Image: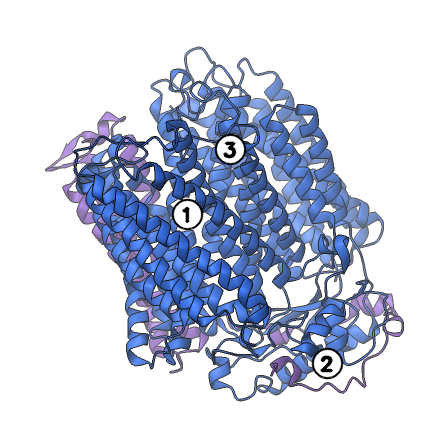
């Protein structure tokens, strides 16, 4: 312990390339990977455990703030016609409570767990994009602060966590309240997406050698599914909220039915995010449960394969449920059937997991420690919430209980039982890994029982009071309706629940100093995070483990034995290269080592980019447009600094390593990570485009004449020419990639110039076309969606041109060769996607009016 | 004790950064034959296709079916009767059949691969193949269940 502590504090100065290092390889690696010291160093920190812990700490503070709002709600409802808080404060309290718990607690907390634990559980040294992890932390924290700063301006959001239009639109909510909601939470969503990208790459390609697809811990399966769902759901939400902000600040008409918009479009788009959001929280929580249950049952997880696929199928199905939140708005019967079927059937994969956990516990010899108690609590509560979930998935039943307290009871059983209890189990389970000390067991048990009893007292009566007809979101009620006693019990229960959470806080502070020392593996667990010391060294693993089992610490007497070639590779990596932060990528299915690559070192640029981005969003709340531009400039500077190439020539030593082990050495970054990064960025942009195209079709279906009579159908010539030029750009990039792969540097430069010129011409043509249109974005929803789609194309293309321009500059500076041209490869991937976006968007924007 | 300390590296081959920064000759850097055989995997392409056949078919079926259902009330021809069913219902049921066929193709193909795979549950081929069977069964069932409900739903009847 002390030795580890001294190692951790030994990181004095981090200049990984030039700084001579001495001592054993382990000490050298620890210094090489440690974060810089001091106040400024804290802001340059990139360590996965530091960032993960910080994200979780901030999320927990928001959790407490959201909890205070919940207590305000319960206080007001303690008796009929109470006047403890005003109706306005009540509206603010339930809005802040729901928004905080959904956006600022659950998802960031789980992503914090992922960033903290995945590299350990996967047996690697860090996440693939450490700077993106830092960006996630800053942008989430700053976004949350911006959200809560609404209290300082007396402009607290008050339209509910779902922000339904038209209530949240410019006519009914003209103040700053909803701007805070849309822009502060919008910017925090960017952080969630960024974390999702690196979680996906980590699970797919940064596993320990030998951790083949059939050996991936369920934790990693769960976070992989969660991260993919985040990409789809949060991107949709971001676009949706920005459309509403455009209605409020830029005069578009997306949600204004008077001018061709639709208020139900908001509901569709919001719930396309909103329902998967529940599974984005539940799936990783279930993954954590699947790690904890076997350890405390002393029994391997029953039906590993079934559980893994249950998670995957839940991820798919979670996107087919959204309209069950809208059964009462008036859907065609056939449409409702689709959503009702999926809502009921998603119980099957959930049931598979529950039976797996029960079977594992039944077959094992349970050890009744606090993490296990929370898991058992989860099982009981979640099953109760799941059963009522199936009930409200049936449309006729939903009509009866919609917007009643029955629904409130249902989703709190699901979310507190299905997410909060597993999160608390995880706190107790993994705290020793981070701090080297166990949380106190007696306080832990008190914590559990207070929360368990408090939860049932709070939410079980809500089932009854809901069936008796009590509606949600009403700030008071009349006496004599038979609701009084249930509300009183709920309020008492809420305070018991709060006492349980307070007990955890006490336990946390008590155990930080007084907790029992944990040792490396205090629970006798099976997964790789327990193979390092507690707390772990900066580099996580000096010698990467070689995985030969799903339960390596139970089945493998020695983590560093196995196939001889693999042993030689991992041992060699343990003592070399020690000049830069070396991590490993492995192949997708069999986890064979692919690359040894340099991870980015400590940097302040993620902070600069985050400050720039938050400035844009904060300034827009107050319509300070010059400050918006300033924030944009800061962000661009930050992005350039962040991505400025820090090229390191490959050495003879590294080449020899490469030849000996058959694993590529990439001192300038991983090709696998870079390409996956670009593919996922493309996916994010594709989802954004799909959201707008869905909106286009939805609005079109609502309008009898499209475009409206006052707007002529757009001319075809210029946009078609521009789309063709975009295709030429993509082809030029393809040609460039082939030339550089053949080591023809001169030809590649010419290809880049052609791509640049063609892309610029496409943008110019589209711009000229847009400025000459006989309608604007304000007169009708048609114009709003038309300009937004065209504008998106233009912005993406200009961004793509920026990347290509930089690539060209570096090409003329001799940075690329047949072996080293990742920037050109990702540029080609990007332009292929952009060309597809151009063709699809042009076909729909300009073809649909003629066809219909 | 920490597993990371189990391996005792000799350190004898560790050289200082200045020494190790000797750059390889440009020629060698360009022409070196990077041996990446270590990362070479069997072709899992057919397995991936079967793994996700039913799921992806369900996604397409869901989107097409849902959008058609939305359009059903706006396009009168979709409400024309073909026997006891509306044209919309017929199209929806046809889509159901296509999605079911895709799930059957994926599931059966995965099952055959699973039968031929090594009898080790952690073997990648066996794992992916069995996963394919499971995913195709669940999405086949989901598609079938949705299709049955559609047969009883009335086009453009509002709920």
Along the polypeptide, which appears first: circle 2 or circle 3?
Answer: 3
- Find numbered disc 3 in the image and state the secondary structure of the residue it sits on: helix
* Tally of numbered tags: 3
Name the residue that disc number 3 marks: A182
Q: Quadrant of residue A209?
A: bottom right
Marks 1 & 3, CB-CB < 8 Å contact: no
Camera-nearest label, 2 or 1:
1
Name the residue that disc number 2 marks: A660
Along the polypeptide, which appears first: circle 1 or circle 3?
Answer: 3
Chain coloured blue: A
In the rendered view, tell whether residue A498 sits above or below residue A94. below
Task: Using the numbered discs, state the Cα–Cα distance from disc 2 to disc 1 in whole angstroms.
Answer: 47 Å
Residue A287 can be seen, yes or no: yes
- How far across and down, in percent of the image, does residue A613 sit? 65, 38
Q: Is residue A666 left or right of residue A353?
A: right
Q: Quadrant of residue B142?
A: bottom left
> Which residue appears at 56% of the width and 87% of the height?
A558
Task: Using the numbered discs, state the Cα–Cα distance from disc 2 to disc 3 in whole angstroms.
Answer: 55 Å
> Which residue appears at 43% of the width and 33% of the height?
A92
Q: Residues within 10 Å of mark 1 (few under 14, many from 20)?
A: many
Q: Is residue A155 left or right of residue A817?
A: left
- How far across and down, in percent of the image, does residue B5 sit? 66, 83
Q: Colour of chain B?
A: purple
- Seen from the viewer's position, the closer of residues A158 and A635 is A158
């Amino acid at each position: 312990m002390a030795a580890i502590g001294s190692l951790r504090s030994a990181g004095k100065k981090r200049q990984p390339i030039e700084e001579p290092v001495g001592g054993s390889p382990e000490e050298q690696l620890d210094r090489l990977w440690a974060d810089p010291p001091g106040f400024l160093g804290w802001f340059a920190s990139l360590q996965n455990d530091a960032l993960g812990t910080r994200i979780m700490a901030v999320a927990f503070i928001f959790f407490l703030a959201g909890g205070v709002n919940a207590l305000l709600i319960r206080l007001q409802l303690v008796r009929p016609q109470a006047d403890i808080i005003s109706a306005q404060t009540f509206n603010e309290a339930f809005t802040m409570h729901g928004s905080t718990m959904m956006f600022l607690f659950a998802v960031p907390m789980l992503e914090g767990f992922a960033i903290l634990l995945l590299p350990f559980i996967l047996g690697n040294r860090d996440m693939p994009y450490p700077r993106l992890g830092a960006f996630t932390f800053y942008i989430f924290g700053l976004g949350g602060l911006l959200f809560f700063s609404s209290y300082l301006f007396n402009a607290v959001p008050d339209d509910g966590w779902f922000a339904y239009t038209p209530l949240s639109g410019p006519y009914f909510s003209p103040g700053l309240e909803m701007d805070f909601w849309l822009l502060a939470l919008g910017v925090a969503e960017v952080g969630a997406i960024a974390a999702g990208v690196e979680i996906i790459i980590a699970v797919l390609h940064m596993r320990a050698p030998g951790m083949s697809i059939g050996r991936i811990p369920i934790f990693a399966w769960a976070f992989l599914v969660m991260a993919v769902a985040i990409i789809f759901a949060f991107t949709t939400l971001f676009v949706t909220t920005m459309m509403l902000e455009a209605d409020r600040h830029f005069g578009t008409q997306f949600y204004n039915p008077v001018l061709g918009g639709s208020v139900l479009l908001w509901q569709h788009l919001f719930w396309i995010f909103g329902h998967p959001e529940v599974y984005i929280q539940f799936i990783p929580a279930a993954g954590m449960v699947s790690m904890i249950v076997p350890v405390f049952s002393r029994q391997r997880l029953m039906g590993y394969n079934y559980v893994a696929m249950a998670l995957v199928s839940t991820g798919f199905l979670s996107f087919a449920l959204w309209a069950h939140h809208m059964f009462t708005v008036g859907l065609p019967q056939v449409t409702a059937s689709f959503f009702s079927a999926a809502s009921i059937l998603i119980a099957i994969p959930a049931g598979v997991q529950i039976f797996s956990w029960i079977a594992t516990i039944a077959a094992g010899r349970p050890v009744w420690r606090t993490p296990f108690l929370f898991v058992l609590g989860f099982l009981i509560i979640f099953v109760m919430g799941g059963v009522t979930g199936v009930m409200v998935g049936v449309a006729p039943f939903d009509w009866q209980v919609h917007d009643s307290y029955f629904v409130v009871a249902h989703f709190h059983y699901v979310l507190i039982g299905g997410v909060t209890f597993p999160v608390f189990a995880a706190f107790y389970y993994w705290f020793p890994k981070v701090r080297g000390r166990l949380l106190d067991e007696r306080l832990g048990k008190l914590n559990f029982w207070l929360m368990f009893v408090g939860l049932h007292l709070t939410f079980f009566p809500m089932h009854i009071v809901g069936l008796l007809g009590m509606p949600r979101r009403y700030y008071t009620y009349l006496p004599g309706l038979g609701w009084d006693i249930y509300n009183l019990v709920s309020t008492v229960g809420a305070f018991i629940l709060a006492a349980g959470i307070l007990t955890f806080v006490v336990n946390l502070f008590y155990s930080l100093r007084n907790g029992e020392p944990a040792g490396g593996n205090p629970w006798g667990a099976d997964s790789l995070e327990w193979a390092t010391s507690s707390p772990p060294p900066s580099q996580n693993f000096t010698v990467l483990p070689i995985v030969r089992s799903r339960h390596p610490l139970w089945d493998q007497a020695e983590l560093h034995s196995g196939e001889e070639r693999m042993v030689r590779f991992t041992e060699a990596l343990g003592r070399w290269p020690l000049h830069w932060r070396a991590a490993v990528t492995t192949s997708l299915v069999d986890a064979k080592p692919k690359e040894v690559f340099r991870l980015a070192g400590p940097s302040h640029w993620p902070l600069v980019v985050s400050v720039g981005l938050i400035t844009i969003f904060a300034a827009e709340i107050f319509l300070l447009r010059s400050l918006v531009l300033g924030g944009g400039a800061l962000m661009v500077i930050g992005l350039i600094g962040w991505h400025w190439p820090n090229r390191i020539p490959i050495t003879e030593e590294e080449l020899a390593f490469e030849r000996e082990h058959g694993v590529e050495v990439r001192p300038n970054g991983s090709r696998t990570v870079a390409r996956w990064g670009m593919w996922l960025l493309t996916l994010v942009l594709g989802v954004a485009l799909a959201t707008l195209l869905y909106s286009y079709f939805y609005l079109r279906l609502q309008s009898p004449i499209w475009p409206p009579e006052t707007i002529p159908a757009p001319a075809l010539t210029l946009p078609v020419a521009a789309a063709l030029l975009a295709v030429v750009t993509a082809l030029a990039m393809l040609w460039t990639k082939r030339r550089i792969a053949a080591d023809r540097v001169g030809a590649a430069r010419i290809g880049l110039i052609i791509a640049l010129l063609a892309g610029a011409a496409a943008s110019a043509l589209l711009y000229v076309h847009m400025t000459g249109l006989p309608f604007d974005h304000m007169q009708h929803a048609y114009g709003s969606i038309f300009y937004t789609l065209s504008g998106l194309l233009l912005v993406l293309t200009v961004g793509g041109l920026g990347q290509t321009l930089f690539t060209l500059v570096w090409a003329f500076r001799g940075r690329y060769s047949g072996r080293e041209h990742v920037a050109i490869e990702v540029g080609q991937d990007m332009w292929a996607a952009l060309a597809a976006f151009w063709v699809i968007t042009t076909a729909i924007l300009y073809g649909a009016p003629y066809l219909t | 004790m920490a597993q990371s300390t189990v391996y005792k590296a000799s350190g004898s081959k560790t050289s200082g950064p200045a020494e190790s920064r000797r750059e390889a000759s440009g020629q060698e850097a360009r022409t070196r034959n990077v041996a990446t055989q270590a990362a070479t995997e069997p072709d899992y392409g057919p397995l991936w296709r079967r793994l996700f056949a039913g799921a992806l078919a369900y996604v397409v079926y869901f989107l097409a079916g849902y959008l058609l259902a939305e359009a059903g009330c706006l396009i009168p021809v979709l409400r024309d009767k073909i026997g006891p069913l509306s044209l919309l219902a017929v199209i929806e049921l046809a889509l159901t059949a296509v999605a079911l066929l895709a799930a059957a193709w994926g599931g059966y193909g995965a099952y055959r691969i699973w039968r031929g795979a090594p009898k080790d549950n952690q073997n990648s081929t066996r794992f992916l193949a069995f996963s394919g069977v499971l995913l195709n069964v669940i999405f086949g069932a989901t598609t079938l269940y949705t299709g049955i409900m559609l047969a009883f739903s009335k086009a453009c009847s509002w709920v």
